[in-house]
Image: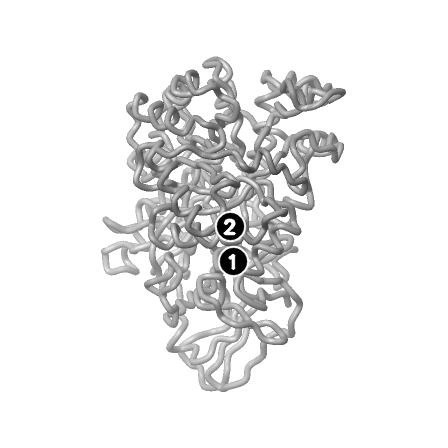
Amino acid sequence: MRAALMYGAGDVRVESVPNPTIQESTDAIVRIVAGCICGSDLWPYASKPGTAEGARMGHEFVGIIEDLGSEVTGLSVGDFVIAPFVASDGTCDFCKEGLQTSCRHGAHWGGDGDGGQGEFARVPQAEGTLVVVPTGFDEKGEEGIAKVRELTDGDGTQAVLEAVGLKPAIEMAIGVVRDGGTISRVGAPQFAEVPLGFGEFMRNITLTGGVAPARAYIGELLRSYSRAPSNPAESSTAPSAWMTSRPATELWPTAKHSKYSSAPNEEDQDPMDITLNNGVVMPALGLGVFQSPPDQTTAAVQTALEVGYRHIDTAAAYGNEREVGEGIRRSGVDRSEVFIETKVWVSDYGHDETLHAWEKAAGKLGVDQLDLLILHQPAPDRFAKTIAAFKALEVLLADGRVRAIGVSNFMPHHLEQLLAEAEVVPAVNQVELHPYFQQPEVQSMDAKHGILTQAWSPIGGITFYPGWGENRKNVMRDRTVAAVAQAHGKTPAQVMLRWHLQQGRSAIPKSTNPARIAENFDVFDFELDTAELAAIDALDTGIRSGPDPDVARPERFAMVIPEA
């Protein structure tokens, strides 16, 4: 089977290992359906030393019993169970209870590459560890709700482990959860064909949270998993015909949305959110302010927030942090609703210098906490100071002065050097990325370590901005992109942004033009199909238009960032 193995803090690899077998008469072998990959004391939250073979990761999961030891009498093969690993050491922000089977770091086995724990697990002392989920009913709708209420002595369940983001399943989840309880994952079963529009699906899965063990599970979804073969990659669990497509927000208007999402209404769709590797939720689409003149930045930020953006990306080197803060205040949008991202410039690299850089940025922005603070360049000609700067970011993260930390323009070899010395894996790597320059090696390296790839120049502005070289090919005029745009009644810029979002990246298009700002945000009401995504993928030239991160720029790097 495959399993997640740890060779050191932050060095997690998926490898083939022998299937587990019964070793003690009190053991159980469980096929994992969904599991947490944070590993608590076994992953980057603590610096557990590796072993020659790699230390097996493990944490809470849900699954189906495949085999039992001879002394296990209270469980049966085929039972659907929860394994709440109460041995969590409390270092993971989302596993302090040791009972959370809906960890937002979780993953399903059966996809390509990543996954949590192993495809099977040996559970010692099974009867004292595993919690059986009641599943012996076929009723749906009101009858199903009544059955769950009966099973829970009329109280309802504290948490529903997973609800398909479709009308009957959502209605049932709402009907069985008790007051104050939670619906842990709203979306669709893994491997299912999702009969939802992409925007609806992404909206629905933002309704997350909840502790377990739960005493109920939606019968339709469970039966699909129970029928799955031992190789989940071969399973097919499309929802039944009785499930119909409806946004969860129509069914549950009071549902809690991400704090960075606009409140939904009948006309608007919420922007897509992304959960970073430390659990912080960030809107995937933001407004960039690179090269935005300070006297235009305030109005641009105010306009963006009025349109619906909830993510603003700036940098010390842009010289407009103060104006970004003013734009946020003028918008009337509460500070808690806006995700602020900024960058430390190279002249402020070094441990103490970077701590002071936070003071300068926070002072100009007029805030006491930054949502995301990243290093602007790898600066390989002074990489020791880059490492010291990142360690300062780790201090700021631990102190709560920032909610997430990251890097920008880091190539795979820069990341390797950084990860060898860092305690915290960066949450974000912001790089030049557009259809003509897709950096697959960088994206692969980021994905391997759970780092979100964020695109600067996401619509290829760097291919036509003045002053960035001659003989460049303007991606905005590409015929393939134009044809896709025409098919959807959208602009080339909107198609490129949609391409980023559907492939799981964050994008931060820049503009000071109110019409363009609004246009760039209007990307949540259409979906590119597989062929269209592939056609855009095929446009990669491998030619960089912006600065090469491996080339030192001493004069530019020496630019002094003014005090607040």
Q: Mark 2 points at which residue?
A: 426
The answer to whether residue 382 is seen in the rendering is yes
Secondary element type, mark 1: loop
Image quarter where the C terminus lies is: top left
Structure colour scheme: one colour
Q: Residue at x 30, y 21 (%)?
A: 330
Q: Residue at x 58, y 62 (%)?
A: 12
Q: Which amino acid does label 2 sit on?
A: Pro
Please report contact status of discs 2 and 1: CB closer than 8 Å, yes or no: yes
Please state which of the two labelled residues, at mark 2 or mark 1, is closer to the viewer.
1
- Residue 5 lies left or right of residue 148; in this view the side is right
Residue 22: which quarter of the image? bottom right
Above or below, 318 relative to 187: above
Q: In this view, does 392 lie to the left or right of 3?
A: left
Quadrant assignment, res 247 = top left
Mark 1 Cα shell of 10 Å, populated few (<14), some (14-19), many (≥20): some
Q: Mark 1 points at which residue?
A: 422
Residue 79, horizontal then vertical, whole percent: 46, 68
Image coordinates of residue 213 in percent, x first then y, are: 35, 62
> Is residue 200 something one can see in this rendering?
no
Q: Which amino acid lies under the numbered mark 1 shown in the image of this protein?
A: Ala
Residue 420, by quadrant, is bottom right
Looking at the image, is 100 positioned above or below residue 307?
below
